[in-house]
Amino acid sequence: MQRLKQLLIQFTISTPDINSSYLHSPDNPRLHLINKRIPLSAGITKEINVTPAYAVLYNQDGWFLIAKRRVKYYYFGDGTTGQTFPGGQYFPEAKGPGKYALPGGGINAGEDTQTAAAREFLEETGVNLPPHTTITQTFTYTDKRGKKGSYEAAYFRVVKKGDVDTTLTTISALSLRHAETIIEEIDTNNWSGQVGYRNIVDFVRRNRIAQWPYDNELTDADVWNIKLSKYWSTVKSWDGDPYIGWYYTVLEYLRTHILQLTE
């Protein structure tokens, strides 16, 4: 899949209206895809008509994997082709730079929600999902212009409870550290554009680096428990946030409908 080309994009984001628990109008979850989709010319406002899918890796005790978005990115791709940016580029505000995030991105043609979410999890964390069962859910929203849209979530429940922690360890100790090594190579060697991404692919092969994020989106990862008030309070604070409000909706569904918890 042809991936990101960084461009300057003008867009307006409005404060969302919350019509019900599952009818949000974050304005607009599709805008978080603007760095991973069709190139847009500078100064052009364009609707992003790609439905996002988010991945929630969790266990029966309520532990789930959460990440934090980078402020700057240095490369994007699919593990084979992509783009690199020496010196890095700042994420636009719509991407929620420096904020918490769930792995996710646009659903490709021919993909279902589960396939897209699993692919995005691998691309952003550099780690395959452990054995799991899956539930998927569609969420709808209406933005300030009255335009309706939707986004998807795949809830991957691990077969072995400890696999959430094991996956986190691999992401934090190996994959995200390898991303920093790749960034150093990009800057040191001035790798840029599509050729730069091919240089990354060659570099990881030569150095036998197995786990590395194909997309340079995440700076950190952690495991939280949706059942514990200290974590749930933080998640609830995202409700209505125009840049990450949909993560609240996705995780509220995990808590209330899948794990069947109440306040």
Image (spheres, grey):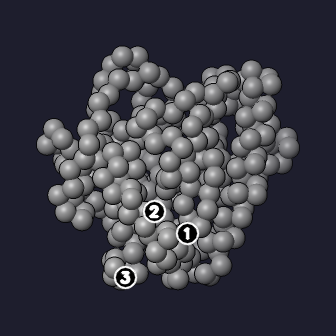
Q: Nearer the viewer, residue 205 or 20?
A: 20
Disc 2 crowd, CA 10 A, few/some/many (<14, 14-19, 20+)? few
Q: Residue furthest right?
A: 207
- The residues tagged by marks 3 and 2 sit, at their Cα atoms, a distance apart of 17 Å
Residue 167 seen in the figure = yes
Classify 189 as above or below 219.
Answer: above
- The residues tagged by marks 3 and 1 sit, at their Cα atoms, a distance apart of 16 Å
Determine which quarter of the picture holds residue 45.
top left
- Residue 49 in the image: x percent, y percent? 30, 39
Q: Which residue is mark 2?
A: 234
Q: Residue at x 44, y 21 (%)?
A: 8
- The residues tagged by marks 1 and 2 sit, at their Cα atoms, a distance apart of 10 Å
Q: Amino acid at mark 2?
A: Thr
- Circle nearer the N terminus (1, 2): 1
SS assignment at label 1: strand
Q: Nearer the viewer, residue 92 or 30?
A: 92
Whether residue 91 sits left or right of residue 75 in the image: it is: left
- Residue 188 in the image: x percent, y percent? 80, 25
- Residue 25 in the image: x percent, y percent? 24, 49
Q: Amino acid at mark 1?
A: Trp
Q: Which residue is mark 3?
A: 261
Pick the quarter of the image with the C terminus. Answer: bottom left
Residues tagged 1 and 2 counted as in contact (Cβ below 8 A): yes
Q: Amino acid at mark 3?
A: Leu
